[in-house]
Amino acid sequence: MFFADRKKKAQALVKSADADALLITHLPDVRYLCGFTGSNAALAFYGRRVVLFTDGRYTTQARQEAVGARVVIAKKSALREACAWLETAGATRCGFDAGHTTVAALDAMREMVSGKLRRRFFLPLQSPIAKIREVKDAGEIALMRESALLGCRLYEHILGFIAAGISETAVAAELEYAARLAGAEAMSFDTIVASGLRSALPHGHATGARLPRNGFLTLDFGVILNGYCSDMTRTVYLGRASETERGVYDAVLAAQEAAVAAVAPGATCGDVDEAARSVLRQAKLDRWFTHSTGHGVGLEIHEGPRIAAAQQQKLEPGMVITIEPGVYMEGKFGIRIEDMVLVTATGHEVLTPAPKAWTTL
Ligand code: ZN
Ligand code: ZN
């Protein structure tokens, strides 16, 4: 039933874009619209017809997975055959995703349309399905809850493993192994394990560096479960912290909680960003907060909306965003705390309720 609703939204988009057809090739969009998870697909919409073009590797899988779309196994190119079909079916103006189509692919698409139609046939749209995907439906929210909770369980697991002297890559390996055992299809992105001085790198991927006796450890990781990404960050302390270290941690936590509290339908993304930034400004730490406050998450790890300074976009019920302010003092240490937050009809719900008060190991 969710697929039928999503299909309707795509069809409405075709009309509002002043087109009569739509070609979707970005794989997460294809999955969103019809459930197909293969690595080669072109989903063509014309009138009430929806056709999924893929190749011979996916003959069985496409028939099993695709909902509400006829499956065509292309002999050579799924993309080219989709374009040829659209013209034959009667389409004259076809929206396509300019954000995910290479110049070479567009040339190949054009070649399949006959001369008299070709000039006006393809209409570039800016990531049309991405906009629809910003608001999750009930089916997606149920899956994202599970994915986020698995992340929380893994965090608890890894706390029992962390100790001074262990390498960052060993921590990442243990986390990822446990994730796979628990049913994760993959990690949402390269696991970030950044310890000691390296915690000051906002995106410090795990290296051979050993966890310090005294210092911060930032863990930023996510799992993909049933196609949906989780994303969370916790920063813990190994050993005995200085007063400064505690003070900065408390400020980041206060900023993070202020931004979470600001999440509600109708609030602008800029308001939520400012809620975090103003706390760090008061603590004279804002110059170390060098990125935006958060991002949408779903089938992909980074989706809309952007939770950043001056963003006028308003939050809507069903959006799932991250709130992840951080402070990175080069040559010293860094701290980031990140939750996934669902915008509800009346406010918000944190999907990653793992502890984030000061944790010493
Ligand atoms: Zn993250
Ligand atoms: Zn994130």
Image: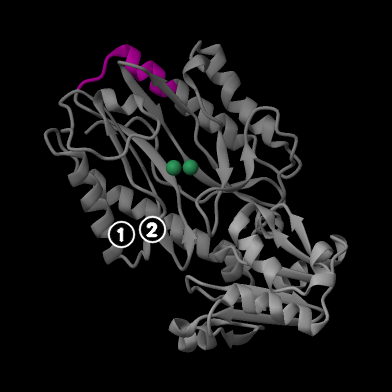
Task: Label the magenta part by its dominant secondary structure.
Answer: helix
Circle 1 Cα neighbour tier, 10 Å, few/some/many (<14 / 14–19 / ≥20): many
* Amino acid type shown at disc 2: Leu
Asked where in the image residue 129 lies, by quadrant, the reply is: bottom right
Question: Which residue is under mark 2?
Answer: 150
37, above or below 102, in the image: below
Label 2 secondary element? helix
Whichever of callouts 1 and 2 sits on the residue coming sooner in the sequence is 2
Q: Are marks 1 and 2 in contact (CB under 8 Å)?
A: yes
The magenta region covers 240-250
Query: What quarter of the picture does the C terminus occupy?
Result: top left
Q: Is residue 234 left or right of residue 230?
A: left
Residue 222 part of the magenta-drawn span: no
Q: Residues within 10 Å of mark 2 (few under 14, many from 20)?
A: many
Mark 1 C-beta closer than 8 Å to ligand 1: no
Res. 160 visible in picture: no
User: Which residue is nearer to you in this view: 110 or 306?
Assistant: 110
Q: Residue at x 19, y 23 (%)?
A: 214
Element type at mark 1: helix
Q: Is residue 357 above or below residue 185?
A: above
Q: Position of residue 159 (x, y in %)?
A: 25, 44
For the point 55% across and 51% down, the residue is: 297
Name the outermost residue toward the left: 165
Cβ of mark 2 under 8 Å from ligand 1: the answer is no
In this view, 192 is above or below 112: above
183 relative position to 47: left or right: left
Residue carrying label 1: 179
